[in-house]
Image (tube, coloured by chain):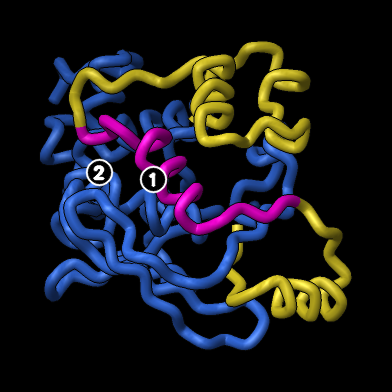
Chain colours: A yellow, B blue
Amino acid sequence: MQYFRSEIHLSRWLERSGIAYGQVVGVPTVWELARAWYAGRLSPSWSRRTAPESQNILAKVGLTHEFWNLIALDHGQRTG
Amino acid sequence: MSDAPQQSTGFDDRVRLAVYRSFVKTAQPPHPDELARQVNATPEQVRASYGRLADAHVLVVQPQSPFVRMEMPFSAVVTDYEVLDGSTRYHANCAWDAFGVVAVLGRDATVRCRCADCGERVAFRIEHNKLEPGDGLIHFVVPAHRWWDDIIFT
């Protein structure tokens, strides 16, 4: 997950690196995602989420494209 | 030390938390020998716990070493994604994790990213859980179901 100053910078980097375009997310959405994803990590009672629970966090910040699908090939395993 | 559990969720939780607390306090993971003393276990028991925590996608051990490379969102190695909190400089595994470090710290901090194209540094200030406006975007290359195929690349 890399930061780019703009779509122009991203396009230039994709062309240079030969890496395929994935998905672009705005910085405010990534901040909201990070807050939800990493909540409670310092708590002794923290436990790993199931894949559906993680999927729900992605969906709540609007990441619903199939690119964000954790479950299809994960068969319900727990995720970060 | 003989009574330290060898395969216990409770023991692994203590190891997990001790690594996090070290990252929060020093921006680095503990030395495995130091951690063993902290949790009243042997270095071998700590290494075994690291293995289980890695299997559970909680942390990543540096290949061919006993050292933690990542405990998400923290990175033990220097990256282009920093979090500045007073005099402490944390490193994160990626742009998402840089914001994750701020979330874990739970206090005001500044995320500094380097544009992967031009190398220019950009800062994002977060105060009282609010992100101050800034430019740019974050590109995800790897689809979510493949993030852990090669987490270092991801």
Residue B145's spot in the image, x, y percent?
71, 32
CA neighbours of label 2 inside 10 A, class few (<14), some (14 to 19), many (20+): many
Q: Is residue B134 magenta?
A: no
Element class at badge 1: strand
The amino acid marked with disc number 2 is Tyr
Q: Is B137 situated above or below A23?
A: below
Residue B47, quarter of picture? top left
- Residue under label 2: B20
Residue B132's spot in the image, x, y percent?
32, 64
Image point (49%, 27%), residue name: A57
Image point (68%, 47%), residue name: B150
The amino acid marked with disc number 1 is Glu
- Residue under label 1: B71
Chain ID, mark 2: B
Q: Are marks 1 and 2 in contact (CB under 8 Å)?
A: yes
Residue A25's spot in the image, x, y percent?
61, 53
Q: Is A42 situated above or below B62?
A: above
Q: Nearer the viewer, residue A34 or B6?
A: A34
Q: Quadrant of the N terminus of chain B?
A: top left
Q: Nearer the viewer, residue B136 or B56?
A: B136
Relative side of B40 to B70, left or right: left
Image point (19%, 47%), residue name: B106
Q: Evaluate whether residue B65 shows in this view.
A: no
Q: Is B15 situated above or below A77?
A: below
Image: magenta residue range: A23-42
Q: Evaluate whether residue B128 shows in this view.
A: yes
Total labels drawn: 2
| Residue A77 tag number | none
Residue A72's spot in the image, x, y percent?
76, 19
